[in-house]
Structure formats: structure tokens, C-alpha cells
């Protein structure tokens, strides 16, 4: 059996969530015309569906529902006169396709470009080569942050009081932020300190 | 406010006809669960907020696609939420878990609102997961609840990606055989 023919495995991994972005896109395109794949995906959704019952809920912020109602009220890409949802077709607006957000992003980019131009001009003026920070270039800030939580002893984590946990969390965020900001010494010191608290 | 399965089915059917009160009932009954799902996968509140909006916007648009004969309403809703969250997570090169260490814990609490039928299904599924052995069971649950890719798992375990893929495929095949459907 070729990899492409392993529909069960592919469908199972798609539903499980382990596929890369490209693989997910391929599966989503293929399932539209491949009935066997579509059926296998539905079967896996049914098999793994009960795991949802184990998901602890988290209350979403109130503004989420307000924004949903705004989108619905805005005419939402195809409502009819009664505000009823369009049926059929109805492909969904891309998450990042709202014009308001793009205006903010565009304004930010313009500002960023202006700042960069000023910095480059200044460096050119004083003929300075910016420090490269070769060690920092190798630091994976997100990975270090995630590893900290992933490698934390679970029994120990469960016993930490909420206020101390909040402090720990803030320290981890500081370490991540220092890493992102290029402060190697501070980031390393904080991550080392956090590492000692894991066990 | 919890709704029974039948009440949720009816609320989705009314939503499909443009009933905003029914839509609100669906949101109130399910948003806590769905937000937990997307936040666990994305790890960042601002992304989870956006994805949750998109989830319910789709529900409003496509409630008519829900077929109670082919899936439970919460499975249908959670599938939309998981797919959107996984797609969004894949767009990010580095995910941050921000201020929510608790989301890295695998869920263990039983949902009191689950029906007897759902509890039986969950019991069967967990019995089959137990049959995989502790390591592969945890692997499957980590992927499902956190949406970790093969590459991420391979990096974490220090094993080749191909090995992780083999483990996952074998685990899935064994689960399918065990569940017998």
C-alpha cells in the first residue's frame, strides 16, 4: 500500500491534528472529490469525538459574542434581507480579511518602515555595523518557553498554589520577552532559574 | 446554560432558519467548551478569541449543514472549532503558551453534562487508548488536545519524524481495530 493509498492513516492523522499546514491543505482539497477519504474522515471524527467531553471549558471574554453579533449584523457576506444566513456556497471570510484590522496593520507597517528608515539612516551616518548577536540568533525563544512548560513535572505543577503559579508564569513570560528582545544574558538567567524550579 | 442533545439539535435547526435567539442559546450552551478547545490548541487568548468568533460565524452561516443523523451536535461544533484552530496554529511558526500553564495539562475531568451514551463511548475509547500502552496513549492525547504536529513531537522526543509518523499510524490502526467500527 502506498502512502497516498493509506486513506485511513491520512484521515486519522487529519482528525487527530498531527498534519502540517501543507498536508492539511492537501487533505481538505482532496476530500471534496474523494468519497473514500471523506467517509474515513467522518468515521474518525465519530471515533475520536468523545474526547471532546474531556476538554475542560474556559469562559470566553464577553466581547467575543458582541463581535460575532456585529459580524452577523454587518450583512456578513451574504445574509438576505431578514438577516438570515446565506445557504449553499457561503465560503467563510478569511480570519485576517477584515478591512479594519488591515488598516491598523497597514498603519503599523508604515510606522515601522519609517522607524527602520530612521535607524538605517542613523547607522549609515555614524558608519556603525549593528551588533549581530550570533548566540541570540540560535535561540529559539518560543521553543524555550514551550519546553519549560512541557518539561515541568506535572505532579509538582499540580501542587503549586495559584498565586505562585501566576508568579512562575510571569517569570516565564519575562524570559520569553527578554529572549525576543535580544537580551541574551537576562533571558538565559531567567530560563536557567525557571529550569531549576521544574523538579 | 446546558442544553440536552435534543435541545441543542433543535437550537441548531432554528439557527439555520435565522433565529438569533436560538443562535444565542447555542452559543451559551457550547462556547465555554469550544473556547477551551481552541485555547488549548492555540495557547494565545487573542488568537483563540478570533478563532471562536469565526467558529460561531460559521455556525450561523452553516447550521443548515448539520445532520443529527450523522453526528452529535457537540461533535459537529467541536470539529469546526478544532479545524479552524489547527489551521490557525499551522499559520504560526512559533506558538506561545502565554499565561496559561494549565492548558498543557491533559484534560482529566469528566464533563458532567455528557450524556450516558457519550460516557459509554468515552469509556470504550479510553479502554482502547489504554491498550496502546502509556507512551502511545499520551502521544495520541497530546496530539489531539494540543494539535502538535509530527515535527513538534519529533523535536520534543528527539526521535525522527518518520518514526513518529509510524507510531501515530500504528496507534490509529490499533484504535480502529479495537473500536470495531
Image (cartoon, grey):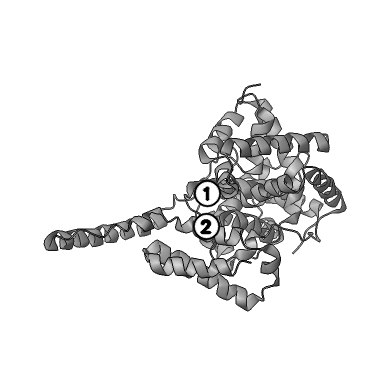
Picture quadrant of residue A64: bottom right
User: Residue A194: where, in percent of width, then height?
Assistant: 54, 68
Discs 1 and 2 carry the same chain letter: yes
Give the SS element for disc 2.
helix
Name the residue at the bottom extreme.
A163
Left of A180 or right of it: where is B103? right
Q: Which mark is residue B42?
A: none
- How would you rate the neighbour count of disc 1 (Cα within 10 Å): few for under 14, some for 14-19, many for 20 or more? some
Q: How many marks?
A: 2
Q: Position of residue A39 (x, y in %)?
A: 70, 31
Residue A61 seen in this snapshot = yes
Label 1 is found on which chain of the structure?
A: B
Comes first in the chain, label 1 or label 2: 2
Q: Residues within 10 Å of mark 2 (few under 14, many from 20)?
A: some
Q: Nearer the viewer, residue B138 or B121?
A: B138
Q: Is A84 on the left or on the right of A184, as rendered?
A: right
Picture residue at 80% right of the left edge, 45% below the top: B125
Residue annotated with mark 2? B47
Q: Residue furthest top?
A: A1
Residue A199 in picture, x, y percent from top left: 64, 67
**Mark pair 1, 2: CA separation:** 8 Å
The secondary element bearing badge 1 is classed as helix
Where is the N terminus of chain A found, in terms of image quarters?
Answer: top right
Instruction: Check contact, mark 1 vs mark 2: CB within 8 A.
Output: yes
Which residue is under mark 1?
Answer: B88
Q: Depth check: give the residue in front, B19 or A104.
A: A104
Viewer-closest of B106 and B45: B106
Q: Quadrant of residue B101?
A: bottom right
Task: Residue B176: give x, y in percent of width and height.
Answer: 77, 35
- Which chain is home to disc 2? B
Q: Determine which quarter of the picture holds residue B49.
A: bottom right
Q: Is residue B67 visible?
A: no
Amino acid at each position: 500500500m502506498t502512502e497516498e493509498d493509506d486513506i485511513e492513516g491520512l484521515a486519522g492523522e487529519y482528525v487527530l491534528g498531527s498534519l502540517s499546514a501543507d498536508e492539511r491543505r492537501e487533505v481538505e482539497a482532496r476530500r471534496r472529490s474523494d468519497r473514500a477519504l471523506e467517509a474515513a474522515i467522518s468515521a474518525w471524527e465519530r471515533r475520536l469525538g468523545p474526547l471532546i467531553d474531556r476538554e475542560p471549558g474556559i469562559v470566553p471574554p464577553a466581547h467575543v459574542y458582541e463581535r460575532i453579533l456585529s459580524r452577523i449584523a454587518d450583512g456578513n457576506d451574504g445574509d438576505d434581507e431578514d438577516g438570515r444566513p446565506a445557504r449553499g456556497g457561503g465560503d467563510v471570510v478569511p480570519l485576517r480579511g477584515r478591512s479594519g484590522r488591515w488598516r491598523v496593520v497597514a498603519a503599523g507597517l508604515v510606522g515601522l518602515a519609517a522607524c527602520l528608515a530612521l535607524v538605517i539612516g542613523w547607522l549609515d551616518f555614524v558608519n556603525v555595523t549593528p551588533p549581530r548577536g550570533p548566540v541570540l540568533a540560535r535561540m529559539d525563544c518560543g521553543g524555550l518557553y514551550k519546553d519549560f512548560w512541557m518539561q515541568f513535572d506535572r505532579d509538582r505543577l499540580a501542587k503549586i498554589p495559584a498565586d505562585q503559579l501566576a508568579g512562575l508564569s510571569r517569570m516565564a513570560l519575562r524570559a520569553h520577552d527578554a529572549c525576543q528582545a535580544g537580551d541574551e544574558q537576562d533571558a538565559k538567567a531567567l530560563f536557567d532559574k525557571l529550569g531549576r524550579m521544574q523538579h | 446554560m446546558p442544553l440536552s442533545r435534543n435541545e441543542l439539535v433543535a437550537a441548531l435547526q432554528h439557527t439555520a432558519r435565522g433565529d438569533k435567539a436560538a443562535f444565542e442559546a447555542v452559543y451559551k450552551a457550547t462556547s465555554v467548551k469550544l473556547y477551551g478547545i481552541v485555547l488549548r490548541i492555540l495557547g494565545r487568548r487573542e488568537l483563540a478569541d478570533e478563532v471562536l468568533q469565526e467558529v460561531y460565524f460559521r455556525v450561523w452561516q452553516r447550521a443548515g449543514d448539520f445532520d443529527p443523523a450523522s453526528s452529535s451536535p457537540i461533535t459537529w461544533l467541536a470539529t469546526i472549532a478544532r479545524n479552524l484552530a489547527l489551521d490557525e496554529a499551522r499559520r504560526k511558526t512559533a506558538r506561545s503558551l502565554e499565561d496559561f500553564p494549565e492548558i498543557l495539562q491533559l484534560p482529566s475531568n469528566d464533563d458532567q453534562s455528557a450524556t450516558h451514551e457519550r460516557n459509554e463511548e468515552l469509556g470504550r475509547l479510553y479502554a482502547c487508548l489504554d491498550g496502546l500502552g502509556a507512551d502511545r496513549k499520551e502521544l495520541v492525547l497530546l496530539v489531539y488536545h494540543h494539535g502538535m504536529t509530527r515535527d513538534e513531537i519529533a523535536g520534543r522526543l528527539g526521535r525522527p519524524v518518520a518514526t513518529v509518523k509510524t507510531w501515530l499510524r500504528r496507534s490509529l490502526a490499533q484504535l480502529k481495530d479495537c473500536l470495531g467500527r
